[in-house]
Amino acid sequence: MCGIIAYTGSREAAPILIAGLRDLEYRGYDSAGVALQGEANAASAVAKRRGRIAELETALRERPPPSAHTGIGHTRWATHGAPSDANAHPHTGCDGAVAVVHNGIVENYAALRAELAGRGHAFASETDTETIAHLIEDELEAGRDLLAALRAACARLAGSQAIVALSPREPGVAVGARVGNAGGVVVGYGEGEMLLASDLAALLPHTRRVAFLADRQVVRVTAAGASYASLDGAPADVPAHTVALDPAGAQRDPYETFMLKEIMEQPRALSDTIRGLTRVEPAGLHLDDLGRARPWLTRIERVLLVGMGTSLHAAMVGRWYFEQIAGLPADIDNASEFRYREAVLGPETLVVSVSQSGETVDVLEAMNVARARGAPQITICNTPGSQTTRVAEGAVLTRAGLERGVASSKTFTASIAALFALALETGRARGRVDDGTLARHVRDLAAMPDVTGRQLEAFGEAEAAAERFRETRHMLFLGRGPALPIALEGALKMKELSYVHAEGYAAGEMKHGPIALIDRDFPTVALAGEHALRAKIVSNIEQIRARGGEVLAIVTEGDEELTALADAALTVPRAPALLEPLTAIVPLQALAYATARLRGCDIDQPRNLAKTVTVE
Ligand code: F6R
């Protein structure tokens, strides 16, 4: 979950590392640090501070580092050892011969630490990462070069890791390793300079030519280029390609937060995604990245969709699409639960993983289980080249652009659009979707960016509604049918942005327990669009109101009856039944945003969270 950056070239390294860390801060913000390589054979200059990157910058201003053209940096989401200066990365061995930044967990770190301490190594932190530095130091002492020392150290580590290191013994060199699914190591090819980073966001200001390390691969970069090997030392060929992501997409201005920018960007994100996958006139689909998965669309008997968090909610919407459009039995599963069950599946089940980052460890581990069972796989992903796109036989890429807010918004709606297109493609392949049906669905989908755009013009309505929830401590979000995933997602947004305890529930379940919670201090948001089994939701609203509970209803434009029945209402434009989730989520994103703002929360970097969860 942590952010990693490395630079080697002819420019001053420190400002590049700091800018890179800012681009990666959404991956963790417990502490930040850099190691800069000055002259050969001198220890690396390390500066690190607990807290945000601004603290590190203050430290660098107070004690300016030596001029350096090679360096590594890290922004931390704490696992082993509390957030503190000492536990911040980079970590060094005893004599400063190596500096290491790390993402992942060294599961056998206690045993390694005891062994290393027994050999006289002195530890300066409580982290698992520091054991890696001491292991590499021993290997360097034994005469290995830095890359060989890193490989040897990796061989001793249990668990999944992404590691980047440098040593003053090899000026101008940085090395990196990926073992398992603790997160990516992306290699950026600049003009006379090279970079390594945990994800693309930090590389895009410098280059769009990148290569992704696969599991059990290592890389050595100098200003002149990169060389790759597998963990056992065999040379590896890792092709570089140019990513079509716009570096400007990584900028926040003129919005006050990335989250607001990304909510507002949804019409564009949807439009780019839909245009990348469909054609309206004549109606057609071009899911060009389905690759080896395509023939399976006619052979499979069921679909299993997996994901985590917001992406799992998108998968829940996708289940409706596979059932209703493609006529296939479809289930969803939380990836972290799926991987630990004896799930019964094989080549008859298409596994569809949804992951905006393509690097979420639970999703990747679930995909490994599915692969071991022989299930064909397609991933819905916003990050070309990421690990899910490599594990799956095929991909449907969303084109939402980089998402920087820790809480997902535009990638949720883009994933839903991609799932709709995939269900259509599947229905088409199986002879279930005829030309007329295809044309109607594609036309409906293509209209959604405009519908969403009009809806965002009414963002201010959510701000007024949020006033009600400024002091609220608990909330219920209710939905039925395709609105259930939206209720769950609305509650998740409210929790993570504003720290209000929000429960998403199937409205039909309410009478089976949660109704006991309802009183005047426990408001409900009811998803009551015209296709969300409206009549049933009306009964739920009556039951809540009868018990003194306050109700904010999400209703279709012009629904006077429901507007009058609820205490307050936010409207959504009329949309086709299957696409109503795309409209229904927008007021809930806006509501969570506005509530968080009123409560003074840090919207782009909510407490305890990090984007791209690469530890279990
Ligand atoms: C919530 C959120 C997370 C992610 C989850 C999966 O706003 O962003 O719940 O959806 O961590 O991430 P990806 O989609 O990258 O696999």
Image (cartoon, grey):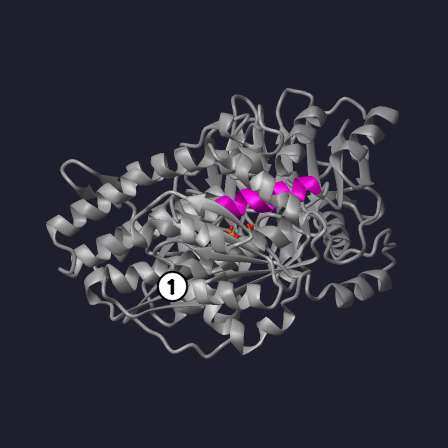
How many numbered circles does the render carry? 1
Q: Is residue 383 above or below residue 472?
A: above
Q: Position of residue 403 (x, y in %)?
A: 52, 39
Q: Is residue 448 above or below residue 394?
A: above
Which of 352/393 is in front? 352
SS assignment at label 1 = helix
Q: Position of residue 422 (x, y in %)?
A: 29, 53
Q: Main secondary structure of the magenta part?
A: helix
Residue at x 62%, y 24% (from the top left corner) = 9
- Magenta residue check for 327: no
**Disc 1 residue lies near ligand 1 with CB under 8 A:** no
Which of 243/211 is in front? 243
Q: Position of residue 493 (x, y in %)?
A: 57, 51
Q: Is residue 548 above or below residue 225?
A: below
Q: Position of residue 105 (x, y in %)?
A: 67, 59
Residue at x 74%, y 31% (from the top left corner) = 37
Residue underneath mark 1: 535
| Left or right: 512 as drawn, with respect to 274 | right
Dot 1 crowding, Cα within 10 Å, few <14, some 14–19, many 20+: few
Give the magenta part as a residue range: 587-598
Which of 286/37 is in front? 286
| Left or right: 43 as drawn, with respect to 500 | right
Q: Where is residue 572, by image quadrant?
A: top left
| Left or right: 424 as drawn, with respect to 100 | left
Residue at x 33%, y 73% (from the top left corner) = 346
- Magenta residue check for 596: yes
Which of 529/58 is in front? 529
Q: Judge whether residue 477 can be spotted in this image.
A: yes
Quadrant of the rendering where the C terminus is positioned: bottom right
Query: The residue under label 1 is which amino acid type?
Result: Ala
Q: Judge whether residue 216 can be spotted in this image.
A: no
